[in-house]
Image: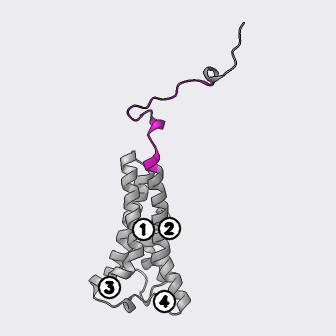
Amino acid sequence: MLVAAVWGALVPFVGPSFGYGMGSTQSWTWSESHLTSHLLPGIAAALGGMLLMRGRRARQMAGALFAVAGGAWFVIAPSLHPLWAGQSMSGMRMGGSAMSSALSALGYHYGTGALIAIVAAYALGVVSSTRGTASGVHSEGSQPDLQTAADKSPVSVDA
């Protein structure tokens, strides 16, 4: 997820240098679209990924939510960007041919965002389902099962 977040944040800046551009944008060109549609959701998803890797359960859950929000923003940004940029949807043309446009849309927005959101949602489910038993903390009313295998054995041995 962290790799996808970094990719999504940096692809509009480095993609054109190896022929993977969006429209006629040059490498390392700064624009409002690059900030709001790529860099900010990439930062949110990367921060979420880092919080998932380290920290306590509450931080991990917050990290997963940041990453889900970042992934969702990658997916919806191309549709919402014309609302605040004052462009029509045709202003978001991503490539020359239909295939190039489809691949650019997947790599720049939809595929990247979906991958991040799916992995983050899975991580959120895993983090929220753990009870903290690995750290020795048990929820109220639950007791750890300290009975050993020998205690559970139905066979008794008399000497």
The residue labelled by disc 2 is 115
Mark 4 or 3, which is nearer the eye? Answer: 3
- In the depicted structure, whether residue 5 falls above or below residue 91: above
The residue labelled by disc 3 is 82
Q: Quadrant of residue 89?
A: bottom left
Cα separation, mark 3 vs mark 2, equals 24 Å
Specify which label sits upstream in the sequence, 4 or 2.
4
Mark 4 or 1, which is nearer the eye? Answer: 1
Q: Between residues 125 and 28, which one lies in front from this camera angle? A: 125
- Contact between marks 3 and 1 (CB within 8 A): the answer is no
Cα separation, mark 3 vs mark 1, equals 19 Å
Magenta segment main secondary structure: loop
Cα separation, mark 4 vs mark 1, equals 22 Å
* Dot 1 amino acid type: Gly
Measured from the top left, where is residue 142 in percent x and y? 43, 32
- In the depicted structure, whether residue 39 falls above or below residue 87: above
The residue labelled by disc 4 is 95
Q: Quadrant of residue 158?
A: top right
Specify which label sits upstream in the sequence, 4 or 3.
3
Specify which label sits upstream in the sequence, 4 or 1.
1
* Dot 2 amino acid type: Leu
Circle 2: element type: helix
Q: Between residues 137 and 159, which one lies in front from this camera angle? A: 159
Cα separation, mark 4 vs mark 3, equals 18 Å
* Residue range corresponding to the magenta coloring: 127-149
Specify which label sits upstream in the sequence, 2 or 1.
1
Please indicate, yes or no, whether residue 95 appears anywhere in the rendered image. yes
The residue labelled by disc 1 is 71
Measured from the top left, where is residue 76 in percent x and y? 39, 76
Q: Between residues 6 and 115, which one lies in front from this camera angle? A: 115
Residue at figure coordinates x 44%, y 41% from the top left: 131
Measured from the top left, where is residue 130 in percent x and y? 46, 44
